[in-house]
Image (spheres, rainbow, N blue to C red):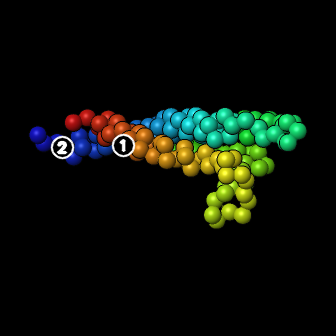
Amino acid sequence: MSFTTAEIAARWARRAAMVNPEVRRTMRSLADLYLAASVKHMDADIYSKPEDVSSTGRKKWVRSRNLRAAERVVLTDDGAGFTLTNETVYASRRHEANKASYPYHVAPARTAHWRDETTVELRTRTAYALAAMNLRILRAGGS
């Protein structure tokens, strides 16, 4: 099978035209997955545990669920990436607590590194999603 230069150029032009839409579609899909997994890990690490109580049986705090409600995903302007963010004042401190390199500590049972767990959980799925995106782009040029 042989192709002319014009045919090869046309195939690569079709592929090039698909790059931005496919990247944006894949990133939106991954962003949704990351947000759902992040909230799932927050629920498991933070909200599934009962509030601490004092010796008198009174709760030490009232659970607001603000941390969970503020978890968001922000796509980059070009749609080629995303970031999980949380505008809650204590979000970073709460996530980093009990890490060796971080000075803030909470009771060990309250450790919640939900973003790290999210990244580990979705590492393989992310790689497969990106590989599938690349194949869709390459196949768009035809054979």
Instruction: From the top left corner, tell me how far across and down residue 3 is, in percent.
Output: 17, 42
Vertical position of residue 120 compared to residue 29: above or below: below
N-term mark: 2 or 1: 2
Q: Which residue is mark 2?
A: 4
The secondary structure type at the circle numbered 1 is helix
Name which residue type carries label 1: Ala
Instruction: From the top left corner, tell me how far across and down residue 133 is, in percent.
Output: 39, 39
Looking at the image, residue 71 sits to the left or right of residue 62; the answer is left
Q: Which residue is mark 1?
A: 131
Front one among 58 and 67? 58
Residue 10 can be seen in this image:
no
At x 69%, y 47%, the residue is 110
At x 77%, y 50%, the residue is 90
Name which residue type carries label 2: Thr
Front one among 120 and 11? 120
Instruction: From the top left corner, tell me how far across and down residue 134 is, in percent.
Output: 36, 42
